[in-house]
């Protein structure tokens, strides 16, 4: 599963081996894996894991995601929109995060593309300020495959956007929906860990 990928090509990092039914080796780094349906059965505390990324698509509300806390996790980041967990988009509203929030959502890939772009337009900011690394800008002739592996959430395409009048504009943005989104999940976890 790790060795070949039709988008990103062959695995170019440490050699990957299966040590036993519960352990993968990435080079010399051992990674414990679990095969259980109920997250509260995963012994997160024993593994030292504090931040859990809930990416199954099943546990997207606070009650269901809380099962990870019962297993010993300290924080859960849901990698999908949630009906009741507060949603954060890096560069947009991460400053609203409070340390007492144990379950949060990183919204969706599309929200992470659109929200920074909308914020820049609304606030009249530029992509090289506090949005650098989250929002990009291009005037090049591009196609979707030009952004494979790009870790920015959104790349504004200046040539494709048009101003229809002073109040109405059409904006076009590109993104590698999983790579950029995964980068924002990591950024959100780092932000949460550094917020006291």
Image (cartoon, rainbow, N blue to C red):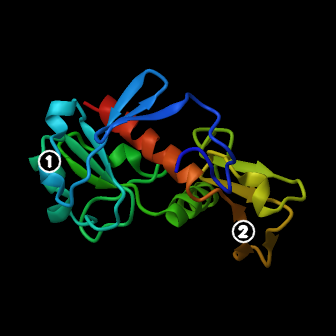
Badge 2 or badge 1: first in the primary sequence: 1
Q: What percent of the width, then of the height, locates residue 152?
A: 62, 47
Expressed as whole percent of the image width and height from the top left, the position of residue 142 reads 85, 59
Where, by quadrant of the figure, is residue 46 drawn? Answer: top left
Reading the image, the residue beneath label 1 is 69
Q: How far separated are the C-alphas under marks 2 and 1? A: 41 Å
Q: Whole-percent x and y of residue 45?
A: 15, 34
Query: Image check: 136 left or right of 185?
Result: right
Please give the name of the residue rendered at 21% of the width and 55% of the height, measured from the top-left corner.
36
Residue 180, which numbered label? Answer: none
Asked if residue 91 can be seen in this view, the reply is no
Q: Which residue is depicted at the point 14% across and 64% down?
A: 63
Which residue is at a point 64% across and 59% down the rendered structure image? Answer: 121
Residue at the top extreme of this rendering: 28
Task: Give the total of numbered labels.
Answer: 2
Instruction: Tell me if residue 88 can be seen.
Output: yes
Residue drawn where x is 55% and y is 56% of the image: 178
Locate residue 101, reporting x and y percent: 21, 47
Is residue 5 shown above or below 23? below
Between residue 68 and residue 113, name the one nearer to us.
Answer: 68
Q: Secondary structure at mark 2?
A: loop
**Crowd class of label 2 (few under 14; some 14 to 19; many from 20; radius 10 Å):** some
Please indicate whether residue 98 sits to the left or right of residue 31 in the image: left
- Pick whichever, 181 or 140, lies toward us: 181
Which corner quadrant holds the C terminus? Answer: top left
User: Dot 1, how many residues are within 10 Å of its Cα: few (below 14), some (14-19), or many (20+)?
Assistant: many
On the image, which quarter does residue 52 sit in? Answer: top left
Q: Are marks 2 and 1 in contact (CB under 8 Å)?
A: no
Q: Label 1's element?
A: helix
User: Left or right: 157 with respect to 80?
Assistant: right
Please give the label number shown on residue 171.
2
């Amino acid at each position: 599963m790790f060795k070949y990928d039709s988008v990103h090509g062959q695995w170019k990092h440490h050699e990957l081996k299966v040590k036993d039914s519960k352990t993968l080796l990435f080079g010399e780094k051992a990674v414990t894996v679990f095969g259980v349906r109920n997250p509260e059965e995963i012994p997160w505390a024993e593994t030292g894991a504090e931040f859990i990324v809930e990416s199954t698509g099943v546990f997207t509300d606070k009650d269901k995601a809380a099962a990870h806390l019962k297993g010993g996790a300290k924080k859960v980041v849901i990698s999908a929109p949630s009906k009741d967990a507060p949603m954060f988009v890096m560069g947009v509203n991460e400053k609203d995060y409070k340390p007492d929030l144990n379950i949060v959502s990183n919204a969706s890939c599309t929200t992470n593309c659109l929200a920074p772009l909308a914020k820049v337009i609304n606030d009249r900011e530029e992509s090289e300020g506090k949005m650098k690394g989250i929002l990009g800008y291009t005037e090049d002739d591009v196609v979707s495959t030009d952004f494979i592996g790009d870790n920015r959430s959104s790349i504004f395409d200046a040539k494709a956007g048009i101003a229809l009048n002073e109040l109405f504009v059409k904006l076009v943005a590109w993104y590698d929906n999983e790579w950029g989104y995964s980068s924002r999940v990591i950024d959100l976890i780092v932000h949460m860990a550094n917020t006291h």
